[in-house]
Image (spheres, rainbow, N blue to C red):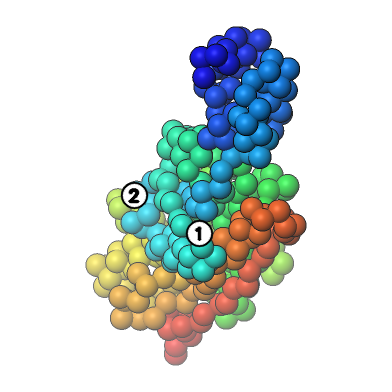
Amino acid sequence: MKKMNINDAARELGVSASTVSRSLSGKGRISKETRRRVIEYAREHGWDPELIERAERGRRKTETVAVILPEVDELVEQPFFYACMSGVNEMALANGYDMLVIIAGQEDLTHLKRVTESGKADGVILMRTYRNDSSAAWLKAAGIPFVSVGSLDDNSAVQVDYDNAGACRDLTAILLARGMRRIAYLGPDDGKIVNEERYAGYLQAYEESGLKVGKEYVCRERLTPSGTRKMVERFLEEGADCILCQDDAVCTAVLKELRIRGVKIPEEIKVASCYNSRFLENYPVTVTTLDFNAIESGRETCRLLLEMLRGQAVPVKTVLSHEVLLKESTEIRE
């Protein structure tokens, strides 16, 4: 390697010596343009023909897909990710691929970059999406194939999602049709696209019904146990007919608070959730929810990624179906 003057090449090309090395060895993620420039330099300066030939063939496939999961606190609260990951793993194994798990937040991309730059995965699946998603932007700039579970601002990125706005609109519309006019909405505005879509669906149902949403019935602040307690108290004092929870974690906290207060569901207040999970099975009253097949979303996301890795054309946006499950917590009882 010393005879090939990697440092000289790096200096002339305006890149690091490690970039030159990775371009020739096929290890790590290097843009096509950088790899082309390095190969041309190597050919012009009479470097080892076999080395150039290997570089032209591109990086070695790992037959591994990486799954980016949110930070641990959110994983504990959201069973969706485990079910979705199960679907990814099932599809990957069926196609001779392994699954590698990466834990990464919206701001810290250290683990993601380390895995992808070292060439440990052929493609990536994003399990959580945000506005101005930093992981998606970095993957796209690095030329790494990826598919997201959830919507992205980038309409050119391959995405698998549900019609979250439409689903929440459907659920809210049914509750309104059942005579519930004061439907309180509880869930933080945390930059996650799925939560923005759910809230938008709630507002849309009210708009289409010709009714107005009272500000006293909406809380989009970050929820702590004490914050949830205060909001439940406020909704009860304001005479809310129903509390519509943004997800199963919020709903579980609301059910717990209502149980502590001895409030009867659905006689005194009704409760519904924009996402269903096993967490809601522990309450004596069955809970009205929106149901999404998380395992199927994992399978579909992985299938699309594998097709991309094979060079096949895939749809940019895939929308999966949902179901409204009407149960005891929103029953009209005399």
**Among the 4 quarters of the image, the one containing residue 134:** top right
- Number of numbered callouts drawn: 2
Say few, some or many: other residues with alpha carbon within 10 Å of mark 2 (under 14 / 14 to 19 / 20 or more).
Answer: few
Q: Which amino acid type is shown beneath numbered disc 2? A: Asp
Dot 2 and dot 1 residues touching (CB under 8 Å): no
Compared to residue 103, the image places residue 49 above or below, namely above
Q: Which residue is mark 1?
A: 97
State the separation of the CA atoms marked 2 and 1: 28 Å
Say few, some or many: other residues with alpha carbon within 10 Å of mark 1 (under 14 / 14 to 19 / 20 or more).
Answer: some
> Which residue corresponds to the image point at 51% horizontal and 39% vertical from the top-left?
119
Q: Is residue 243 left or right of residue 133?
A: left
**Depth order, front residue of 281/92:** 92
Q: Is residue 222 left or right of residue 29?
A: left
For residue 13, say whether it is visible.
Answer: yes
**Depth order, front residue of 294/188:** 294
Tag nearer the camera, 2 or 1: 1
Which of the numbered marks, if any, corresponds to residue 73? 2
For residue 133, say whether it is visible.
Answer: no
